Image (tube, grey):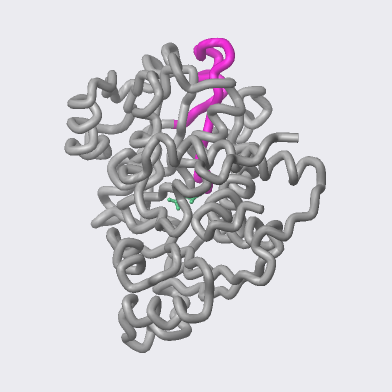
Amino acid sequence: MVKKPSEVELDLLRGHDVLSAKTLSFNQLQLIMATAAYYEDALVNKRRLYDMDGKIMASLFFEFSTRTRLSFETAMQRLGGSVVTVSETPQMQTSSTAKGETLHDAIKVVDGYVDVIVVRSPIKGAAQEAADAADHPVINAGDGTGQHPTQALLDIFTIIKEHGRIEGLRVALLGDLKYGRTVHSLVYFLKHYDCDLIFVSPEQLMMPEEITAELRSEGIKVEATTDLRVAVAAADVLYVTRIQRERFPSKEEYESVKDSYIVSDEVIAAARPGMSILHPLPRVNEIAVSVDNYPGAAYFRQAHNGVPVRMALLALTTGNVL
Ligand code: NCD
């Protein structure tokens, strides 16, 4: 049985929000990884858990979500807790925000009902705004082009599971590095490990300069290229992202880059042995379906890792790891 973290370690996240990968320390990151491994062991061995018995999670998704919302809700239920949900997007406005209520007021109200709040919004900075209004912990499930720290945590958990380590690996991030929030979070976790980064994107979709500059100033080895083949020949991990159609200012701009890279069997044939392929999903067409048969194709395993990682986040931030 995997050991539960000590009381002293558990104090590292009790009562904390999880808003950005930038503000989580390496100790907090390691605690989340250890606690996720502890819960994964419980899931694999079908141990019934009551850590969040009697607790309620608010699931506030103001933007479409399948994996993130369902894995958070599954995580809460696996911990014996329950969930209240608001699911609305600009296409499906049904309640308070459609009536003009501010996020601040909505969160103030929900905060009085529940023990932990999970929020997704199309607006960068919305999770911080929610956290400012709430007394209970707020977890950012994606804020526009900003951050998506819980996805990046499950990405780190996946790399460790697939490779046994992160130190010394070459990690290539491919696709929409400009608008993709998962990579904006992932690089801030990867920088804690001694690994090299390769950014592969069309010129128009490069990683924001302030992020690249910050990583370089901290001594992280970052290479940027437009050539997928160069990256694949060097990478141990290929992290593929979707071109974020909904974030483009115009349809023409999206059309001009949408099929920039397709990871096909031919591309994989030139990969280093043992290369893993990750993708936060949903996939559009950036990975050919035939690549799913490649042993290193880890994206569905990665999606499943969302449950133990989110169990860890819910139990740690509320101080309920029993
Ligand atoms: C990602 C997101 O919402 O940012 N999806 C997810 O959470 N699994 C990536 C994406 O939508 O492309």
89 left or right, relative to 82:
left
The residue at the point 58 percent across, 15 percent down is: 274
Q: Of 121 and 149, which appears nearest the observer? A: 149
Q: Of 38 and 291, which appears nearest the observer? A: 38
Q: Where residue 125 sits in the image (x, y, percent)?
A: 28, 60
Q: Where residue 245 sits in the image (x, y, percent)?
A: 37, 52
Which residues are the magenta region? 262-284
Q: Where residue 141 sits in the image (x, y, percent)?
A: 45, 57
The residue at the point 61 percent across, 35 percent down is: 289
187 left or right, relative to 288:
left
106 left or right, relative to 204:
right
Placement of 272 over or under 251, stated as above or below: above
225 left or right, relative to 217:
right
Q: Quadrant of residue 85?
A: bottom right
* Magenta span contains residue 281: yes
Q: Quadrant of residue 260?
A: top left
Q: Residue furthest bottom?
A: 99
The residue at the point 33 percent across, 42 percent down is: 184
Instruction: Decide whether the magenta segment is chiefly helix, strand or loop.
Output: loop
The residue at the point 47 percent across, 55 percent down is: 14
* Magenta span contains residue 66: no
Q: Give the position of the N terminus as an image quadrant.
A: top right
Q: Where residue 188 sits in the image (x, y, percent)?
A: 34, 36
Q: Residue furthest right?
A: 46
Q: Of 108 and 269, which appears nearest the observer? A: 108
